[in-house]
Image (cartoon, rainbow, N blue to C red):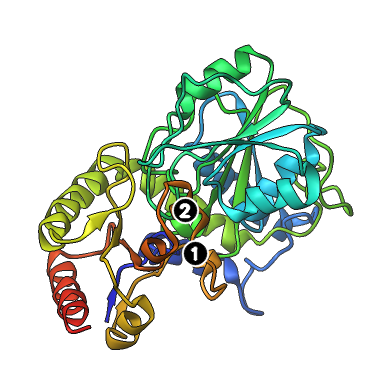
Amino acid sequence: MTYLDYQATTPLAPEAREEMLRWLGGPDSDTFGNPHSPHRMGRSAVAAVELARERVAMLFPAGGRVVFTGSATEAINMAIFGSNARMMAVSAIEHAAVLDATMQEWDPNATILPVNSEGLIDAAAPLPDRRQLVAVMQVNNEIGTIQPVDALFARLREAGALCLCDAVQGAGKLAPPAFADMIAVSAHKLHGPKGVGALWIRDGVELRPFIHGGGQEQGLRSGTLSPALCAGFGAAAKLAVERREEDAAHVEILWTRARDLFAGWTLNGSAEQRWHGNLNLRLEGLDVARLMSDCRDVMFSAGSACASGSGRPSHVLRALGLTEPQAKSSIRLGFGRYTTLEDLEAAAEKLIRAASQQ
C-alpha cells in the first residue's frame, strides 16, 4: 500500500507518538491528571500542555497567543464568530470551514475574492469596501497554490481590516503569514495527532468566548484539554520547524520525479507558486471512481477529502475556470516526509497503467 494523500492527513511522527504515550496514563501511572486540577498530578499535566503551547507557538509570528482547539475547523469558527466582524470577504477557494461558516451562518453577503486560472489572488487588486474581516488561506488544500498573503494582508491591515489565515497546509512548511491577525492550524497535517488544532491570535485582538463553561483556554474555549494530544502536537510542531529545510528538499525531489512520471497529464494550478507536495492533475476523459477502484492499494484523493462523497465538482477547480468534466477528471496526489521515491514511482506506474486501460 502506498499513501499519497498528505493533504487529507499525514502519518504520525514517531517522536509525537512517544510524547503522547507518556501522557495517556493508566491507573498505575501519575500522568493521567486533569491539567486544570490544582494538585501535583494536575500541575504536571498542565506543565506538559504549556510546553506544547510553547512548541506550537514556534509555527507562528512573535507577538501573539496560542489557543488549543479540537481542530482547525473549530479554530476558524472561533475566529469568525468571535470577531464581531459582521462584514466579511473571503477568497473563492477557501476551505469549506471558512466558506460555510461565512456564507451560511455569518455574512451571506460576503465579498468573494476571485482567483485566476492558476488559482492565485491578485494581491494588487482593489480592496473590498468596508470589510471588517478578510479570510485568505496560505496554501490551498486541493491544488497547493501559495497565496500572496503577506502582500495582501499588509494592505488590508493598513486599511483597517482584520485578517484571518487558514495556514493548515502551510504550517511547518512555510514561513508563517507575517501580517495575519489570526491563524488556524491543525496538528494532523504536520505529522501530529488528529483531534487537536490551534488558533493563533495577535496581541491586541479580542474575541468573544466560543465555548462556554469552566473558562479554560484563556476564557475562549471551555473544556478539559487532553495533555496527550497537546503534547503530540507540540512535538510534531517542534520537529516540523527543525526539519523544514530537510523536508522541503525531499519534497522537491519527489515533485520533480512525479512531474516527469505524469508528463502527459495537465497540472491544475500554478506550478511555481505552489507547495510542491501537492500534485493535482487531470486527464481528459478519466473516470476517477474507476481509477480508485482499480488502484485500491494507492491512497489518493479525487479532490478535497472534506468534500469527498458529495458528488459535487470541486469549487476550487471550478474557480480556476475548469469545466465540470475537467474537474471530475482530476486527482490529487500528496506526498511528504515519509514518502520514498520508490513508493512514488511504484504508485505512479499503477495509476498511469490503470488510466491508460480506460
| Nearer to me, 92 or 97 | 92
Q: Position of residue 169 (x, y in %)?
A: 44, 49
Which residue lies at the image location 59% right of the left edge and 70% below the top edge?
24
- In the picture provided, is 41 more to the left or to the right than 149? right
Which residue lies at the image location 62% right of the left edge and 57% below the top edge?
71
Q: Residue 313 carries which label?
A: 1
Task: Residue lying at the far right in this picture: please name it.
Answer: 213
> Who comes first in sequence, dot 1 or dot 2?
1
Q: Is label 1 in contact with label 2 (beta carbons under 8 Å)?
A: yes
From the image, tell me which residue sits under label 2.
318
Badge 1 amino acid = Pro
What is the spatial separation of the Cα atoms under label 1 and label 2, in whole angstroms?
7 Å
Q: Position of residue 128 (x, y in %)?
A: 64, 24
Q: Position of residue 101 (x, y in %)?
A: 72, 50
Q: Which quarter of the rendering shows the C terminus? A: bottom left
- In the picture provided, is 135 more to the left or to the right than 217? left
